[in-house]
Amino acid sequence: QVQLVESGGGSVQAGGSLRLSCAASGYSISSNCMGWFRQAPGKEREGVAGIYTGSGSTYYADSVKGRFTISQDNAKNTVYLQMNSLKPEDTAMYYCAATLRCRGIFYSDLINPRTYGYWGQGTQVTVST
């Protein structure tokens, strides 16, 4: 049974940083695709960052490029999202996602929610002015 557990969310002032973690069980992050998504109240789920862990290739939404970094630790079976220079518009519930069907997808599909079949429960990020 695949389980994804996010942690690291919280409240921070604009300009601050947070690091989110996504610990996987029942699933090896090695040579698979994983992504981070977010959803603000009243808005659709938005892809933030994705990674193909086999090569370390990454893809980011334009809104976070240069501020967020997705990374992996295969030994800990965990994917991270380092978020710097946070803005109030980054406020949302952040979700981790994983898939076993990674081969042949386009890089942009790394932040397409349809790519993923497994989701965590989310962790809240609130950025104040």
Image (tube, rainbow, N blue to C red):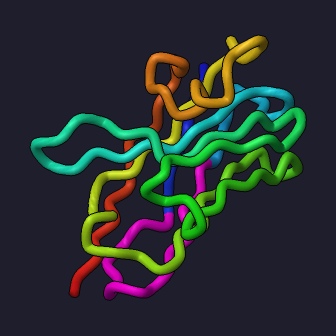
Q: Nearer the viewer, residue 100 or 86?
A: 86
Q: In this view, does 57 lie to the left or right of 126?
A: right
Residue occupying image coordinates x 42% and y 66%: 9
Where in the figure is residue 69, as x and y percent of width and height? 64, 61
Where in the figure is residue 2, as x and y percent of width and height? 60, 24
Residue occupying image coordinates x 53% and y 76%: 84
Where in the figure is residue 122, as x and y percent of width and height? 38, 47
- Is 13 magenta? The answer is yes
Q: In this view, does 63 lie to the left or right of 36?
A: left
Residue occupying image coordinates x 23% and y 35%: 44
Magenta span: helix, strand or loop, mainly?
strand
Q: Tag count in the figure? A: 0
Q: Quadrant of the N terminus?
A: top right
Residue occupying image coordinates x 32% and y 87%: 13
- Which quarter of the picture shows residue 12? bottom left
- Which quarter of the picture shows residue 47? top left
Relative to 96, is 33 above or below? Answer: above
Q: In this view, does 113 lie to the left or right of 11?
A: right
Q: Which of 7 and 117 is in front in this view?
A: 117
Q: Quadrant of the C terminus?
A: bottom left
Residue range in magenta is 8-22
Q: Which residue lies furthest to the front in this view?
A: 62
Where in the figure is residue 20, as x and y percent of width and height? 54, 62
- Is 74 magenta? The answer is no
Relative to 22, is 110 above or below? Answer: above
